[in-house]
Amino acid sequence: MSLLELKNVSKIYGDLKALDNVNVHVDKGEWVAIMGPSGSGKSTMMNIIGCMDKPTLGEVLLDGVDIAKENSKKLTDIRRDKIGLIFQQFHMVNYLTAVENVMVSQYYHSMPDEQEALEALGRVGLRERAHHLPSQLSGGEQQRVCVARALINHPELILADEPTGNLDEANENIVLDLFAQLHAEGTTLIVVTHDPEVADAAQRTIVLEHGKVAREVINEHFDEQQKLWLARLNAENKG
Amino acid sequence: MTKRRMFLRMITASLLRRRSRMLIALLSIGIGATILAGLVTIYVDVPRQMGAQFRSFGANMLILSDDEKGMSKDQMDKALEGIPADQLVGAAPYRYIRVDMTTRQQSFTSAGTDFDQITKTSPYFSVEGRYPENPREVLVGKEIAETIGIREGSDMELTWQPAAGNAEGDPSEDRKPGAVLSGSAEGWSGGTVYVTVKLDDSSRIASLTIDAGTQTPEIGGLAQTDEAFSRQFVGKTLPLTPGEDVDALSGATITSTAVVEALNTARSTQDTVAAKTVKYTVTGILTTGGEEESYVFMSLEDMAGLTGSDIVDVAELSVSASAEELEAYAEQITGNVDGVRARLVKRVTRSETAVLGKLQSLVFLVTAVVLILTMICVSTTMMAVVSERRREIGLRKALGASDGSIRTEFLGEGMFLGLLGGVLGAILGFAFAQVVSVNVFDSSITFQPLLLPAAVIVSMGVAALSCLQPIKRAVAIDPAIVLKDE
C-alpha cells in the first residue's frame, strides 16, 4: 500500500529544473534511501516531501492527499500530523533542555506530556541527559534527541536529511540502529544521504542525478541485515 | 502538562536562558517605562507641586462683604468652610481704617489682620525685625517708617477718629437691643476713659470693656482691671446715675464717674464711637515692594480695641487648587454664605493655569517622544532577536508550528518583557520622579497606587506594538531553511 507517490513532479527555478519529471513510489513501512551528488535535486525533493515546498508541476500524494494542491496552512497541518523530521544540523531549540525540545514537538502536535517525552529519550538512550541543554550534549546525543523528537508523535513517515552527516561512526551506528528499530515497528523511513553505508542500510535506494531518477537499487541483503540486527539486539539485551 | 504551561515554560526559558540578549530588550522597555512612569507621576503631581509654588505669589481668592459695613468673623469662618482644609493654604483677614499720628500730624492707613495667616498667604512679605505677637504691637510699612523715621522697637501713638458728625442726636436712640456702643469721657487729670458696651436683647448691659487710658494705674486704672467694678454694670439699663446705680472705685471717683458718663454718652459703633488713642510698639518694618509699605499693620484684636468693633473688610485666601476648582468654590461661597461673596484674583489664577498648561503639555510631549523612542528601541531589539532566531523559528515551523503559534510565542515573550519592564519601570520611575521632585520642587511625591498597573499595561502595550513588525518577519520565515546546509 503506497504512502507516498510522486507523479511527474518537476520543480523549475527559472531556467533550472531542480526536479525534472520525477516519479517515485514509497510503500507504507518501507525504508528508502535517496542518494545523489550535490545539485541532484535531493534537497528539493526533500522539501516537497516534507511539505515545505510545492512542485511546479505534477502530483505528490501523501497518504492519498495531493499535497501539491494544498495551501501552506494545510501543509503545516499535514507536516505536523504525519511527518517526523530529522536534520543534518540537529536543530534544537538551544535554550530548551533535551526533554523540553521533545515536548515542543508534542506542544505543536497535541498535548505536551513530559513522561512520554522522557520515555522517548529513554528509547534513544538519553534518559539520564533529559535535563541537559543542547550545549551540554554531544553531536550524537543531539541527533538522538532529534530522533526522539521525530518519533514522539508517532508519525507515518520519518523524513531524515543526512541524519548521520555530522556524526562519528559510533553515533552513526546508534542512529541506524534506531532506524532499524523504527522500521521493525512499521514506520516508513525516507533517508536522504550521500553516504553509501547509510544508503545500504535501507531496503531500496533511489539515486537522483540532474533532477531525474537515475536508477533504483534494491538491497537484496536487507532481510538478512534485519535478522542479524535483531539477533545482535537480543544478544545485547540478554547480555 | 497543559499547553499553557508548556507555553509559559518555553517563554520563561527563552527569557531566562538567553539572559544577555533579553536583558537588552528588558532594559529598553524598563528604561522607557521608568521615564514614562516618572514623567506621568510628575505630570499628575505637577499641579500640586506647582500649586504649592504658586502659592508664594500671594492670594488667589478674596472673600468680600456684600455691603460696605464689612463682614463679621463668623461670616468669614463660615465662608472658609466652603474650601477643603487640605487645599486652604491660608486665609488672612484684613480690615482697613485711617489712623492719625497726632504727634507727627500724619495720617496713615492701618490694616488689621492675622499675622499667622499673613505668613501663609503672603510669603513674599519681608520683615525687618519680627511680626507682632503681643497686644499693642504693630508692623510698619517701609514707606511710613522712612517718612517718619521710625525703627524697630520705637513707640507709635495712633488715634482713631470716628467720622465727624456721627455723634449728633440723643445717645438713647442708639440703645437698641443687641447694639454695641462705645463712648469716652474725661477722667482724672485730663485723661480719657473709653468704654465699649454690648447690650442684650432687652437693651440691658450684657458686657462691657473699660479702657482707663492714662488714669493712674493703681487708682483710676483699676477701672480697667477690677472685675468687681465692671461686673456691677451688667444687667443695668442706660443711662446710669453715678453713686446710685453703681459704686465708685475707692479713691477714684472721678474715673468712675467718667466711666458712667462715657456709658451714658456711648453711641452705636456703626456710626459713632469716640476717638481713641493707643500707644503701640513697632516690632518690625515691612518691605513688600507694593502698597503694603504705606500701611501700619496691627492685629485684628488691637484694631477692635481701637475702634470698638471687630468687623473684617476682606479676607485674602491662598488656595491650592485648579482654576476650575477655585471657580466652583467661589460660586459656592457666594451662593451659600449670606452677606458674603468670593472673587478670584484673576491675575494670579490665570497665570497659574497658563503656566501649568504649558508645563503639562511639555511633559506630555516628552512622554510621547519617550514612548515612540521606546517603541523603536524595543522593535529594533526584537527585530534582532527574530533574525538571530531564524533557524529556531524555522525549526518550530518545520515541527508544525502554525503562524498563529509563532505569533503567540513572540507576542508572549514581548508581553512578558513588557510586564517585567513595567514593574521595573514603575518602581524606578517613582524613584526618578522622587529625585526630580526633591531637586526641582523641593518636596516629595506620594506614590500613586494606580501607577503600577498603569505602567505595566502601558509597557505591555508598547511591547506588543513593538513586536508587530518583528513578528511579521518571524511568520514569514520559511521552514525549509532548516534543511539547507549552512
Image: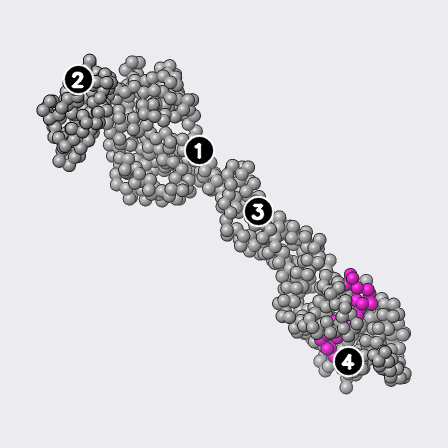
Check whether the beta carbons of the residues at disc 3 and disc 2 lie within 8 A of each other.
Answer: no
Q: Secondary structure at mark 1?
A: helix
Crowd rating for badge 4 (residues with CA inside 10 Å; few <14, some 14–19, many 20+): many
The disc at residue B251 is: 2
Q: CA distance from mark 3 to mark 4?
A: 59 Å
> Looking at the image, which residue is at 36% across and 26% down?
B133
Identify which amino acid the numbered label 4 is placed on.
Thr
Horizontal side of residue B330 vs B473, given as left or right: left
Q: Is residue B213 above or below residue B32?
A: above
Q: Main secondary structure of the magenta part?
A: helix
Q: Which residues are magenta?
A: A134-156
Q: Amino acid at mark 3?
A: Gly
What separation in Å lies between label 2 and label 1 (alpha carbons)? 56 Å
Question: Residue at the location (45% across, 36% down)?
Answer: B54
Identify residue for label 3: B429
Q: Secondary structure at mark 2?
A: loop
| Amino acid type, residue under disc 1 in the picture | Ser
Q: Residues within 10 Å of mark 2 (few under 14, many from 20)?
A: few
Q: Would residue B184 be counted in the magenta stretch?
A: no
Residue beneath the point at 70% across and 68% down: A104
Q: Quadrant of the N terminus of chain B?
A: bottom right
> Residue B49: where, in percent of width, then height?
48, 40
| Host chain of mark 3 | B
Q: Locate residue B251 relative to residue A103 in the image: left or right.
A: left
In three-dimensional space, the C-alpha distance between marks 1 and 4, rounded to whole angstroms, equals: 87 Å
The local secondary structure at tag 3 comes to helix
Horizontally, is A232 left or right of B61 in the view? right
Of the two numbered discs 4 and 2 in the rendering, the one whose residue sits closer to the viewer: 2
Q: Which residue is mark 4?
A: A187
Q: Quadrant of residue A114?
A: bottom right
Question: Toward the viewer: B117 or A81?
Answer: B117
In the drawing, does residue A71 fall left or right of residue A183? left
